[in-house]
Image (cartoon, rainbow, N blue to C red):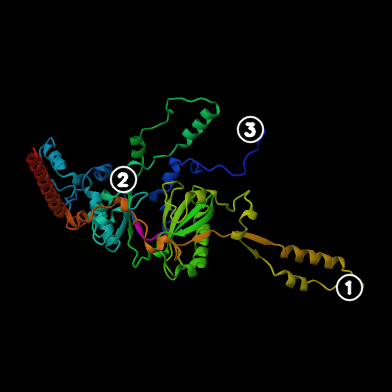
Amino acid sequence: MPVAHPDLVGPTSTPPRPTALPFPPVTKSHILNCSTHSWYPKYKSIIPKARLISLSAPFLSYLRADGIRLPPDPAPAEDSWDDDSSVDGTDELEAVKSDPFAEWASIHTKIQETIAELKGSVFPKLNWSAPKDATWMVAGNSMECRTANDVYLLLKSSDFVTHDLEQVFDGCVDEDESEEEREQESQGGNTLEPPKHARSKEEELSRIKYHLVLRQTIPALNPALEFRCFVRERELLCICQRDLNYFSFLPALAPNLNSKIRDFFHDHLRRSFPDESFAFDVYIPQPYVRVWLIDINPWAPRTDPLLFSWLEILTITGPGPGKSFGDMERNVVRLSLNCDRNSSLSNRPEHTSNGHYSEEDLEDIDDVDADTEEEEDIFIPEFRLVNKDDPEAYNFNTPQYSAHKMPKDVVDASADGEAGLREFMGTWREISAKQEREYKEERDAEM
């Protein structure tokens, strides 16, 4: 049997499977635009009450340092040293070395004052991330903080916060660098020398204006009413709930919530946010009238797509320029902007006795037909909820942030503060020493 020549065989109808997500390059400027301190002043009126505190280099060093040390309560003031210190400042220098918290005592005081201003209860976060993975460290297993030390305990125990401090630009490119790389690639060349404007990772991180965000605790917060929304090229593509549990009352509310979120996006975010693609989180409390902006997230793989997959979001057909509405007919609602066809026909003038319309009547008929044909294509974003039959509805999945959690014994010890953790470590050393002695005794007996 003859074999077809490979060059004469046409391409197969099955499209090749993508080997990587078709993400555009994630730029450092996009990451910075998603930092809370960048967008908070612009959207302050649609955000739950919060305060931003600029963080100094010594405080950032404290957050980056290994181990958890908490300042005494109350913390020493910056001017608490005796005025009779030695002339050369030796005593003052020794005092600073023995008390590492003295370098950022003003920040500690500001945090305490802000908590008091926000009715004694706050939710903390850094520029991008909240320490949701470290709630096991505080009483109540939540992010609610009532003291400055609660804030420090969450921040220093969180891998998410560490990512903000150490890896926020991982996988990102500079706009200028990406253009150079494209130019080199188009010319078929490659250079081992970094661009002249390239900076080290430490230099890049040092240029970030880190802030601590303290948001007033929302009373009776209902996690079922938090939603994540995905925007591509300034079009709202899809929405899903953030809490991965089934709530029986949500399906009936979905059309109204979808409409509220669309209106909110068009009124406040569509044209004002500097980037065309991003994700944002909202909260819509009862009576489901007002929409609150909670967070803005990068258009990047690091943002959790929750009930979607990033492949779905990146390849979904949207209403942008050049997109075919025929491919998404099921997502389009056609609304007539005028009366229906039958009623418009009934408004036509009667023809004359000879069976013909006058020239004036024909002009009126053309106007009616033009108005009747005015229709608008409205793209309705998919609103995805956890269904009753979904596995997530029965909590069969792995607990959220379980990879960041600690054994129960450690959690119980942390409830007693530093003294409890110190006692736990002492007990652990005793158990380890006992096991080592028993192992040596068994080995000696066998010999």
For image coordinates 46% across by 47% down, the residue present is 299
Earlier sequence position, callout 1 versus callout 3: 3
Residue wearing tag 1:
352
Residue type, mark 1 in image? Thr
Residue type, mark 3 in image? Pro
Determine the CA span between mark 2 and mark 1: 83 Å
Q: Nearer the viewer, residue 202 or 11?
A: 11
For image coordinates 38% across by 66% down, the residue present is 222
Q: Which of marks 1 and 3 is in front?
A: 3
Q: Which of 334 and 270 is in front in this view?
A: 334
Residue wearing tag 3:
6
Q: What stretch is highlighted in magenta?
A: 46-50
For image coordinates 35% across by 50% down, the residue present is 129
Q: Is mark 1 on a helix, strand or loop?
A: loop
Query: Quadrant where the C terminus lies?
Result: top left
Q: What element carries label 2?
A: helix
Earlier sequence position, callout 3 versus callout 2: 3
Q: Which of 228 and 317 is in front in this view?
A: 317
Earlier sequence position, callout 2 versus callout 1: 2
Q: Which of marks 3 and 2 is in front?
A: 3
Determine the CA span between mark 1 and mark 3: 72 Å
Marks 3 and 2: CB-CB under 8 Å?
Answer: no
Residue 321 placement (x, y as % from top left): 62, 49
In magenta stretch: residue 47: yes
